[in-house]
Amino acid sequence: MRKLFAIAIMVFMVAGLHAATTDNDTLNAQNAVSLSVLPTKDLTRVPVQVSLTNAVPFTCLQCYLTAPDSADIFLHDGDRSVAHSPSERWNANHQAVLAWNTKRYPNQLMVMVVSTRSEDFKGNDGPIITVYLDASKLDNGDHILCMTKANAVWTDRKKTKTYNMPDAEVTFRIKHGKVVDIR
């Protein structure tokens, strides 16, 4: 039953619907999702963090990432899933759902981290997930990574509250085989 509930929440979020009661207020500065590209000398594995600062508890986070030039430069593991790392903010029942280039959202990566038992993320600030870019496919110069349609969800299995987040973007520069400047 618990897994069925988690799957239902994922389906509702992907479909753009919200179960039970919904609060679509945009969050203020005390509750925000941010996007950052971390500096690295390895262009084949550039870390991109999706972070959450929250004053209220959240169970799930979802957003869409658009790579520079809408290219599929997200690094894939051997099994074709997008390479990612969980964060220390996950509980034992948090899972990542990553989907590239879906019919509804072409040339975007859907990133969702959800708990199968409605557990809240630990803490109130920091990364929720890290995905990786293979930026070796990009030329030297400035590149923009965009985050859209982000939302955070809290649920106790009886009620659900969804918060829409503002879009964000980060500009990073590749120079001589390194990520050197991030804005």
Image (tube, rainbow, N blue to C red):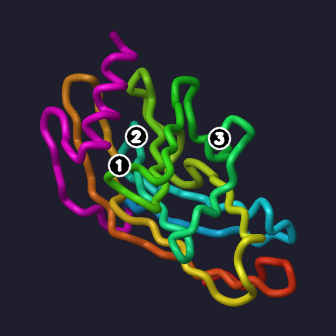
Residue nearest the viewer, comparing 139 with 146: 139
Q: What crowding class fits label 1: few (fewer than 14 Cα within 10 Å), some (14-19), or many (20 or more)?
A: many
Percent x, y of residue 4: 33, 17
The stretch in magenta equals: 1-30
Question: Magenta stretch containing residue 130, yes or no?
Answer: no
Residue at the extreme bottom: 141
Residue at the extreme front: 103
Residue annotated with mark 3: 80
- Give left or right: position of 124 versus 2: right
Which residue is pictured at 41% across the width and 49% down the height?
A: 102
Sequence-wise first label, 3 or 1: 3
Percent x, y of residue 142: 64, 88
Sequence-wise first label, 2 or 3: 2
Q: Is 157 above or below relative to 54? A: above
Q: In the image, what residue type sits under mark 1? A: Ala
Question: Magenta stretch containing residue 8, yes or no?
Answer: yes
Q: Is 91 above or below relative to 63? A: above
For label 1, the SS is strand
Q: Quadrant of the C terminus?
A: bottom right
Which residue is pictured at 38% across the width and 42% down the height?
A: 57
Distance between mark 1 and mark 2 Cα atoms: 6 Å
Q: Is 173 above or below relative to 152? A: below
Q: In the image, what residue type sits under mark 2? A: Cys
Image quadrant of residue 145? bottom right
Q: Quadrant of the N terminus?
A: top left
- Give left or right: position of 112 versus 23: right
Percent x, y of residue 155: 29, 32
For label 2, the SS is strand
For label 3, the SS is loop
3 or 1: mark nearer the eye = 3
Q: Are marks 3 and 1 in contact (CB under 8 Å)?
A: no
Image quadrant of residue 17? top left
